[in-house]
Each structure stands twice: as structure tokens, then as C-alpha cells.
Amino acid sequence: MSKTLELLKDLIRRESVTPHDGGCQNMLAESLVRLGFTEERLDFADTQNIWLRRGNALPLFTFLGHTDVVPAGPLEAWISPPFEPTVRYGKLYGRGAADMKGGIAAFVTAVERFIATHPDHQGSIAIMLTSDEEGIAANGVVKVIEVLERRNEKIDWCLVGEPSSDKKIGDVIRIGRRGSLCARLTVAGIQGHVAYPELAENPIHTFAPALKELTEEIWDQGNRFFPATSLQISNINAGTGAENIIPSSLEIHFNLRFCTELDEETIKQRTCAILDKYGFNYELQWRLSGNPFLTEKGALIDAAHAAIKTVTGIDPVDDTGGGTSDGRFIAPTGAQIIELGPLNESIHKINENIGVEDLDTLSMIYENILINLLSSRTDRIDY
């Protein structure tokens, strides 16, 4: 059994449904401290965060990950218990195998091998872990970055081990992400009997034209890095449950995944302009989950491309698809950020899994990235 597989099994056994860590961070810290990392716990509320750093020199390379996982769902639907890692036909099954304990296991063993062969490497290596990525992410990386920023501890390169790959390990690198802006809209009406609509005001009816316009609005055309912005309704709720009552209010939840052609304030202004046209009473609450970010071509992307080519022979595609990640909290500091990790086909699903061979491949890619960026000039891989 490879060391990466062994480590991943140990992580999966630790039931760490968000925002709980299940002891994962303590276990990893024990081995990393022995390699010269200093350990700093930065817990906030019910969230556990750890910052592990080896060295004080610049540049600072950081692996970013989360030890929390989503709930397993119906246990009877799994082919094996979700927190009992099981290898079957070349795949390891278990909750968190791909998202993202597999990435964590791969970068920890990559760091171990790199330090063994480059004990006096250039710069510094850090590992940042949180147990609050799969939830609302209010007390995780966003709070850790605030601490680092206050003491001017700057990350130069950040690799997020999220499952970015599509068909083969390393075929896709996320070089950015769209922003995410959530909204809760409450439309006021007047409750009444459906037989006397003239004595009531149905908020569903009054909102319907605005709903059509919001969902048909062309927010932008996107650009060469990002698709066009999209507004999606995620929930609509109204009524008392009785079929003969006009409801007094309507609540709508929607989300905009927006690209770098837009910003938060512009979206808010354009949304309110549409709603105001129809003359109904409403309240609108917004929550910004993250702004869009993009890493331009540079040392980190070059090092990742070279490492993937060396290990797999693949020329990866640079992409900005998918949802959000904790990279959104680090991007405003000016760090170069990429996401590179396992295949994303099974994430959040019943029977989540990762290829056993993929684990070692990913660990070797991570090790080669470290070599390309932090080894001395005499033994650095040319690319």
C-alpha cells in the first residue's frame, strides 16, 4: 500500500462532516511538525483551522485544503460504509475521497518526499487547513487570511487541492473562479380568500413579470476566461398550505454566478432597477459568497504545466469553471492561485471515490511543482 493511500484511508475514517474536523488536523500536524513545520491553531467559533509553515524566507508556497466533508446521505445507498475506506476494482470509496481528503493526502506525502530530497529548499512551504469549506465558510480561511494579513504574512503561490480534473489527473487546472452573489427577496402582498381577489393582493402574480425579466436578462457576454453571468432561481416559497387562500408574502432565493465583467454593486443596482419597474413592495437581502478571481499566466501556472507534463505527458487545459472554493478568500491578497486535484466526477455523490493510482500520480505532480518552484537552480527541472 502506498503511503498516500494509507494516509487517505486514515483521513476518511475520521468522520468530519462540516464544520467538524474529526481529528484530521491534529493527526497531520504531528507528522508535519517532525519535518520542521511550526504549528499554529487559528480556531474560530465551531471551526478548526491550522496554519503549518516551514521556513521564514520568501517566496511562500502554500497548499490549501479542507478537512470537512458533506453529509454521507442515505447509508443504505452506499456499496460500503462511507467512513470505512474500501478499495474495490482499483478505486478507493469513502466520503471525502475526492473532495478533498485525497488532495490533502497527496500534497502531504509530496511535501514529505520533497523535504527529504531538498531539506534546504528555497523559500517557505505552508499548509493551511480548515473544517469550514463545505458549510457557510464564515469562520475558516476567510478568518485565517485576516490574521495573516494583519501581520503582513503574504502568500506568493497557493495551490488548492480541490478536485479539478475531468477525465484524467491533471487534465484541467482551475486558474480562477466566478463570483457568487446570493439574494433573498421577499415580496409583500395582502392575504385574502381566493374567491375575492379584489380584496387581496397576490404577491405571486405581481412578481411573475419581474421573474421573467430577471431570468431573461443578459447580464454580460462573458470573456475569454469566463462564461456569461447567469442568474438562477433556487427556491420559491409562498402560501399557507390551504388551496383557498391568497398568500400574504412570497420569498424567492436566487444566485448569480458572475464573471469579471461585473461587480457586486452593478448587479445589485440592475436587479433593483428591474424590480422597481413593477411597483410592488419588497425587501431584498444580499450575501456575497465571493468575488471572481483570475490568475494570469506566471510562475505558478508554468510550474504546474511542466509538472503535469513530466508526470503524465498531458498538456492541461486552464479553466475557470465549477463552483467556488476557498481560493476566493486568498485572491484579494495578490497571491497567484490555482486549483489542481482529483477527478471531480463523484464529488458530493453517493459512493464518492478516487482511483488508487491517481493518488500517487497527483502526489508526484505536487512534488514536481515544488521542485520547479523551490529547489535550487542546480537541481531544478527545466521547462
Image (tube, helix red, strand yellow):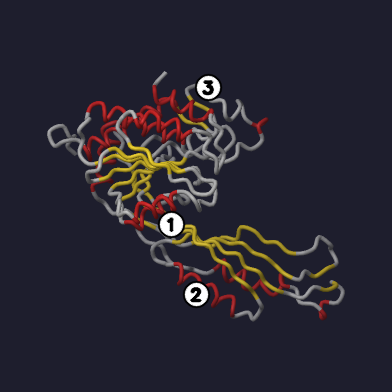
Q: CA distance from mark 1 to mark 3?
A: 36 Å
Q: Are marks 3 and 2 in contact (CB under 8 Å)?
A: no
Quadrant in which residue 60 is drawn = top left
| Image coordinates for residue 296, horizontal then vertical, percent | 28, 54
- 89 shown above or below 369: above
The residue depicted at 77 percent of the width and 75 percent of the height is 190
The residue labelled by disc 1 is 178
Q: Earlier in the sequence, mark 3 or mark 2?
A: 3
Query: Mark 3 belongs to which amino acid?
Result: Arg
Q: Amino acid at mark 1?
A: Arg
Foreground: disc 3 or disc 2: 2
> Which element type, helix, strand or loop, lies under badge 1?
loop
Q: Reading the chain from its start, which is encountered first: label 1 or label 3?
A: 3
The CA span between labels 1 and 2 is 19 Å
Image quadrant for the N terminus? top left
With 46 as the anchor, is 108 left or right in this view?
Answer: left
* Camera-nearest residue between 131 and 355: 131
Percent across and percent down for residue 97 are: 49, 32
Rendering quarter of residue 276: bottom right
What residue did someone put label 3 on? Answer: 88
Q: Residue at x 75, y 73 (%)?
A: 202
Q: Nearer the viewer, residue 262 or 363?
A: 363
- The dot on residue 269 is 2
Q: Residue at x 47, y 68 (%)?
A: 219
